[in-house]
Image (tube, rainbow, N blue to C red):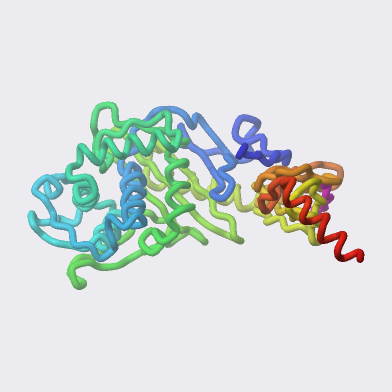
Amino acid sequence: MKKLITLLFAVLALGTSARAVEVAAPSALLMEKETGTILFAKDEHNKLEPASVTKVMTILLTMEAIDSGQLSYDTVVTASAHACSMGGSQIWLKENEQMTVGDMLKAVCVVSANDCAVALAEQISGSEDAFVERMNARAKELGMNDTTFRNATGLPAAGHVTSAHDIAVMSRELILNHPDIRQYTTIWMDTLRDGTSQLVNTNKLIRFYEGATGLKTGSTDSAQYCLSGTAERDGMELIAVIMKDATSAQRFEDAKALLSYGFSTYALKKIVPEAPLSPVPVELGTQATVQPVLGDGGTLLLEKALAGDLRQSVTLAECAAAPVEKGSQLGTLTVTAGEKVVAEIPLLAGEEVPRITYGQMLLRLLRIGFLSD
């Protein structure tokens, strides 16, 4: 079925025009989760070291392994010597120490534990190298064309680079399709090992920014200070990516500036037809009509100035010729704000209607004849 693309005409001249907000970071991006719309961009395709923001992909692949049944939160992982040798941010796993996937995910999300990230990678793929191959393959599937991963942690490695754009893409994939990750990314303080290991989130947004939902910090001497920060207000979740800021405090200030700009300027609107959609007659079909349904694009991201007074108009075909394929376009729902068209949403056939055969037509005519007698 040919994909029908909703046309959004709201004024989203995003990131390339004069910006309503500025950040100190040399590379940054703001994205809305549901639609994937970019609301702000600054040198977003620059290939830079992401440090531990790399772990968004490690977490994503772990969540996908859980969803597929390969792992569960209760799966017990045994730490290898390699995992325990990572250094940097860690929970100081001991070789052969056992911990559940859930606790290791918590350690990765809250304190950016390199040892747990590698232990999860080895559990999923057998080795960190094999897992890295999987990371790069998944990045390619997601269209992350600025990205090459060399490890599962983000520790410095030649050629290990990504971009603000690509970080937003993988962050969106994680929070859109794996919302359960919030049980870890929203933790401010917690413990492991029966309360003997203290955890405090490296992401200060969780404590100090209203609606913060995650996601991942990163810093090394060469990458400087990076962040994929997410927050939700009024049903809209935003992703702010900051790369190569000079200080830790500045990355959080930059992220807050982007998130606050997005929340103050845009609104997410779910479009529902104001009145029931009339069935469309079908010529030579096995049934007389087909019911139209709202197609892709029922969720609109609009400037708040446009979102307050939306109007709808519906255009439907007078009839459709059988066979009618499910998902074929029958009309359009047009959304306007004042004189401005903000969206044209396709109205699609909600079911398949085959063409009537000669035998079926004959039987129908016979029934009509009997009924008329």
Question: In the drawing, does residue 208 fall left or right of residue 113?
Answer: right
Asked if residue 267 shows in the view, the reply is no
Per the image, is 312 magenta?
yes
Per the image, is 108 magenta?
no
Q: For the magenta stretch, what is the residue range?
A: 309-316
Q: Provide the major secondary structure of the magenta segment.
A: strand
Question: In the drawing, does residue 124 fall left or right of residue 344?
Answer: left
Q: Which quarter shows the C terminus?
A: bottom right
Quarter of the image for residue 309 reads bottom right
Which x, y percent locates residue 92?
14, 55
Question: In the drawing, does residue 77 fall left or right of residue 163?
Answer: left
Task: Say which residue appears at 20% left-offset and 41% top-offset.
Answer: 128
- In terms of depth relative to the viewer, which is nearer, 327 or 50? 327
Task: Say which residue appears at 60% left-offset and 48% top-offset.
Answer: 262
Quarter of the image for residue 371 reads bottom right
Which x, y percent locates residue 284?
79, 46
- In terms of depth relative to the viewer, which is nearer, 229 or 173? 173
- In terms of depth relative to the viewer, which is nearer, 316 or 137? 316
Task: Say which residue appears at 59% left-offset and 42% top-offset.
Answer: 37
Task: Say which residue appears at 68% left-offset and 55% top-offset.
Answer: 269
* Image position of 307 with respect to 144: above or below: below
Q: Which quarter shows the N terminus?
A: top right
Which x, y percent locates residue 341?
80, 42
